[in-house]
Amino acid sequence: MNLTLYKTTNADNVINKVKTDDYAVVINLKKDTNWLNPEILLASIAGVDFKDYNYCHLDVVNKFYFIRSIEAMGNRISKLICECDYLETYKADILASNAAFRKQVEPGDYGNIDLENTGRDTISNYDSDTSLVAANTIILSTMGVK
Amino acid sequence: MATMTVTFAGDTAKYKAELWNYALDTKLADIPLDEPYVATGGANFGSNYILFTPVAEGIEFDSYTDDVSLSMPWKAGPIIATINAIGDPFPNGVRGMYLSDERISNVTNSPTFNLFYIGEVVTVTPFNRLHSMDDAALEDFSEVRLIETDVDGNEVFNYSVYIVNLLNIGFELPSAAIAGNSNIILGSLDTGINTPLFNTDSVTVDLGDIEVPASTSSLDYLSNTFELFLPFVESPIDIDPTLCIGKTIHIEYVIDLYTGDMTINLYNGEEKPFSSTKTTIGRNIPTKLVGETNYSITGTNGVINNVLTAYIRHTKPELVEGQFYNLVSKNGSIGLYKGYLEVDNIELQGKALADEKQQIISLLRNGVIIK
């Protein structure tokens, strides 16, 4: 089976992670391997430092994994402690699913939103095209017409 | 091309005028009445006419005259008569002056038209009068003997009971609200003081139009505030963003001249106001009269805020930047969106195992970022 090592700078909760510097290795795994949290033994390869990689993919199960840690097993063997990345592994299913969710508001959105403000405001004044004329207008109202 | 300069005089404040073409039934231009108007010939010139309309409801026009002798004189008398000569397609109360090509061509002078009006419909009750008082009238009025006494000097009658109110408003009222003059009469006492008379007890004051710029962001409808500040009015009026963004707000005061009670009507292009607010302005001038009639000092209604021009204050809050703030609820396919989102409920499709689906749903609820 093929193990592909990657580097990624994305956070764990990112879907569509950017994966770079892929390096493929042919490996064999034990039959009782836990596919959700596999531990993978790799013999050292000239010019390759496994500590440079933090992400990988196993083609036999088509799953992506975080490399949580790397342990040295003697001089020539390294053990990669992996954990399944469900979001990346099942991203096609996730992105095709219907959901009720909350997303960052942007122009064009409407509805009830609890907007969080910085406390700073931009203020604009729009004046009328007509002004009153100041005057001392006095009105005497009376009863009785002669 | 024949031209003629027309000057308007007389009660021009009671009129507004427009140039119309009868054949096309189209308004061509506004005609200011406070400056000479040059009438010009043209292809449809024979159908042009000046259309006069009242500046306010209730004004009744009489006639116009010209002060020059023309070879083909303008028809004097009721202005409506000239309209009748070519048909009368206009609503009641609208009067016009026909500018025939032949007339223009025969004019050798620049006529002045004196515009007259009969008066205005008086809406003050027959029992009351509303006098416009200047300082001289007030001084004269203060010297009027309002108390009748018997030979022993005992008060027999106090005419001040016929004074309803003396109201002071800090701005000019429209001249159209004044019609004629009258002596101040209290009951059966004619004071002999002659003042202009208001023809209505409810005066409408035009405070003009305010244009509120349009917005390209729906966020402005959610977070922005619009407050209308008005002259002599204590509290600003909040206007819903949907009623004012991209609209022209027209403002009018309707003032009760007896009390200073005032209705503020706001329009945004519709015939009917979208907001009507009641308040009180002005000051009841303390008039402490002799006898048992005492008018208490009531102070100033409304405020003196040094504002003569209405304005709308638009406050736009600065939203917290960052993708984890200001979330809006949505339904639909997650794949249509980018950025941070938190899932409340999801119908998760696919072949993931049950435990895996629970893990995925938990992760989605905690918030994910779609690149």
Image: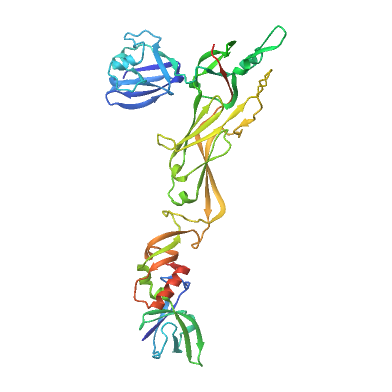
Residue occupying the point 63% across, 30% down: B300
Residue B257 shows in the view: yes
Please tell me which residue lies in front, B348 or A3.
B348
Quadrant of the snapshot with the C terminus of chain B = bottom left
Judging from the image, the colouring scheme is rainbow
User: Percent x, y for residue B202?
Assistant: 50, 25
Residue B136 shows in the view: no
Please tell me which residue lies in front, B36 or B124.
B124
Residue occupying the point 46% across, 45% down: B241
User: Percent x, y for residue B87?
Assistant: 27, 19
Quadrant of the snapshot with the N terminus of chain B = top left
Please tell me which residue lies in front, A56 or B53.
B53
Q: Is residue B307 above or below residue A26?
A: above
Q: Is residue B323 above or below residue B70?
A: below
User: Percent x, y for residue B158?
Assistant: 64, 15
The residue most toward the right is B152
User: Percent x, y for residue A46?
Assistant: 45, 88
Figure quadrant of residue B29: top left
Q: How many marks?
A: 0
The residue most toward the top is B151
Left or right relative to B23: residue B12: right
Figure quadrant of residue B286: top right
